[in-house]
Image (spheres, grey):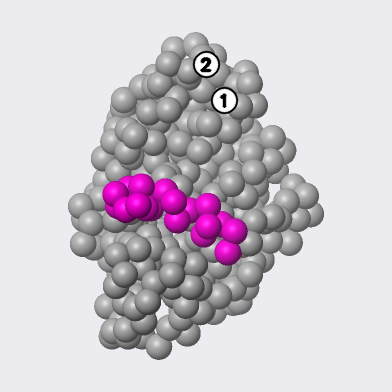
């Protein structure tokens, strides 16, 4: 069995490459390194069954040989406007990865009659009026906000995936991924986990925007990869939420990180900078994942952070 993983050098893509290799698959990784990190795949170089193609999925994709599974994970995903690889600074590339990249990836799957899985996102729910968010919720997204290049790219990608399923009979699946953290996250990702960990490990006060009562739900990467793997192996075609349903305020999360890192600095509050389209509440309803996949997270937030902190120390060159 052979699998193509686009976005292979990304945070999640690299973990998926490793998982499928461990399951005995031959893995073809694909990335153009615009946001992916070659170091994420360095430990797989020379490993039997792994090959890599440097390619932009916005261009036509050709992979010689038979493929049994195609996973489309190629896209900028960081909302950080200060980062060169954040999607606010890669707006056209983000839209092309969601539109052209999905179209080309679906084409490869169709030619090979392969199972196709789209990496979608909780961002398709926008700033939700329904809480927690289940897969029947259509979302509340501002189509012209700075975040829309990512949100709408994923919403279009979902629509295109279902069109291929309905019109061509392609065996497709859609995973809606909620906040995930763990080793191989980019330390300048711009989201709350790397921001807080960097500040805490440098013994700086943690910056909380607004009153800190906005919420997120954090899933450790190993749990997420298990859920994705089970979804690929299933025959489910409709979207499935994969994430941790345990909700935490940003303020409580900041206090936990200070505690686990032994950071003596406190917390500072700043005026919110991302604008009104930044969602205030985010928590998945994982009823479908439990019922269809028999999946739910196993690693709690403290244990997941304890596994993540050494990676950030290494990347920040701290002992």
Measured along the vertical axis of the image, is residue 213 above or below residue 114? below
Q: Position of residue 154 (x, y in %)?
A: 44, 52
Under tag 1, what secondary structure? helix
Q: Which residue is mark 1?
A: 21
The residues bearing labels 2 and 1 have C-alpha atoms spaced at a distance of: 7 Å
Q: Residues within 10 Å of mark 2 (few under 14, many from 20)?
A: some
Measured along the vertical axis of the image, is residue 176 above or below residue 25? below
Q: Confirm whether residue 57 shows in the render.
A: no
Q: Confirm whether residue 17 shows in the render.
A: yes
Of the 4 image quadrants, the one containing the N terminus is top right
* Disc nearer the start of the sequence (2/1): 1
Q: Position of residue 226 (x, y in %)?
A: 64, 43
Does the magenta portion include 122? Answer: no
Residues drawn in magenta: 301-319
The answer to whether the residue labelled 2 contacts the one labelled 1, judged by CB atoms less than 8 Å apart, is yes
Q: Which residue is mark 2?
A: 49
């Amino acid at each position: 069995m052979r699998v193509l993983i686009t976005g292979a050098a990304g945070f999640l893509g690299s973990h998926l490459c490793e998982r499928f290799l461990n399951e005995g698959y031959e893995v073809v990784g694909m990335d153009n390194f615009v946001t992916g990190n070659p170091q994420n795949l360095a430990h797989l170089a020379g490993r039997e069954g792994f090959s890599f193609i440097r390619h932009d999925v916005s261009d036509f994709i050709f992979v010689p040989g038979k493929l049994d599974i195609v996973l489309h994970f190629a896209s900028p995903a960081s909302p950080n406007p200060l980062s060169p690889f954040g999607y606010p600074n890669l707006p056209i590339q983000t839209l092309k990865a969601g539109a052209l990249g999905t179209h080309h990836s679906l084409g490869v799957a169709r030619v090979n009659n392969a199972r196709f899985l789209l990496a979608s996102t909780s961002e398709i729910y926008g700033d939700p009026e329904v809480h927690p968010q289940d897969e029947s919720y259509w979302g509340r997204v501002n189509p012209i906000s700075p975040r829309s290049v990512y949100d709408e790219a994923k919403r279009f990608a979902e629509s295109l995936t279902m069109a291929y399923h309905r019109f061509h009979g392609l065996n497709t699946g859609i995973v809606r991924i909620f906040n995930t953290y763990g080793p191989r996250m980019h330390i300048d990702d711009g989201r709350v986990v790397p921001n807080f960990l960097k500040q805490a490990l440098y013994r700086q006060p943690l910056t909380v925007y607004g009153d800190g009562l906005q919420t997120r739900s954090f899933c450790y990467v190993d749990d997420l990869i298990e859920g994705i793997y089970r979804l690929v192996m299933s025959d489910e075609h409709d979207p499935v939420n994969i994430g941790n349903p345990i909700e935490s305020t940003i303020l409580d999360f900041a206090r936990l990180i200070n505690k686990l890192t032994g950071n003596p600095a406190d917390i500072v509050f700043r005026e919110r900078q991302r604008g009104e389209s930044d969602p205030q509440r985010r928590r998945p309803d994982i009823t479908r994942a439990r019922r269809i996949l028999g999946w739910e997270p196993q690693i709690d937030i403290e244990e997941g952070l304890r596994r993540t902190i050494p990676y950030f120390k290494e990347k920040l060159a701290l002992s």
